[in-house]
Amino acid sequence: MSVTTIPTTDSAPLTREAGNRLVEGWTALWNGDVALAGQILAPGFRLHFADDFDGTGSGYTFGQDELAAFISANSHALTGLTFAAEAAPLVDTERGEMACRWSESHAGEDGDVVVKSGIDMFAVADGRISAVWSLTGNRRFAA
């Protein structure tokens, strides 16, 4: 997937269309297209998890390279791992911020499908994602 970013400045704030494209790229990145990291993530990008994951510890954040490695490792560890945006993102065009609800599914150890949900909150600068705060739940949000 090729994602074209739209630079944002004080005179050209983030648009809903650009926000939608960034979330599409973010979802594709999590679905294994790690080459998108350089296109959609700003230099100095940081991902902040609300939950601790193996090897992360409290307060750990990912930069671009760590994120790509984490995504690759998870896609190999979990059979059929897929991510999907659950709805169009909420885009604050004045502040350059977005929020999106998403779901993850993969095959569990017993073969049953495991589904989780989460919410990501994004800061956007110059048309690229500069920071994400991510909260993952152990079950799917009700629609």
Image (spheres, grey):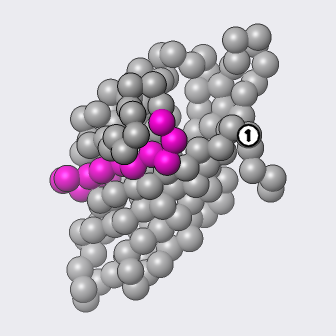
Give how far across and how far down residue 140 sits, in percent: 74, 44
Outermost residue toward the bottom in this view = 11
For the view shown, which residue lies furthest in the front direction? 58
Image position, residue 123 (x, y; %) = 37, 65
Residue 49 drawn in magenta:
yes
With respect to residue 113, does 92 lie above or below? below
Range of magenta residues: 39-52
Q: How many marks?
A: 1
Main SS of residues in magenta: strand
In the drawing, does residue 45 fall left or right of residue 55?
A: left
> In the visual, does 30 lie left or right of 124?
right
Q: Amino acid at mark 1?
A: Arg
Q: Residue at x 29, y 59 (%)?
A: 130
| Residue 96 lies within the magenta run | no
Instruction: Kindly tell me whether residue 21 is visible in this rendering.
Output: no
Image point (49%, 23%), residue name: 75
Image height check: is 63 above or below 93?
Answer: above
Q: Residue 35, how many percent across, how many down?
A: 30, 36
Task: Say whether residue 14 is left or right of residue 121.
Answer: left
Q: Position of residue 27 (x, y in %)?
A: 50, 45
Q: Which residue is mark 1?
A: 139
Point 42% across, 71% down: residue: 97
Q: Quadrant of the C terminus?
A: bottom right
Answer whether residue 92 is visible to the viewer in this image: yes
Along the line of sight, which residue is nearer the eye, 78 or 20? Answer: 78
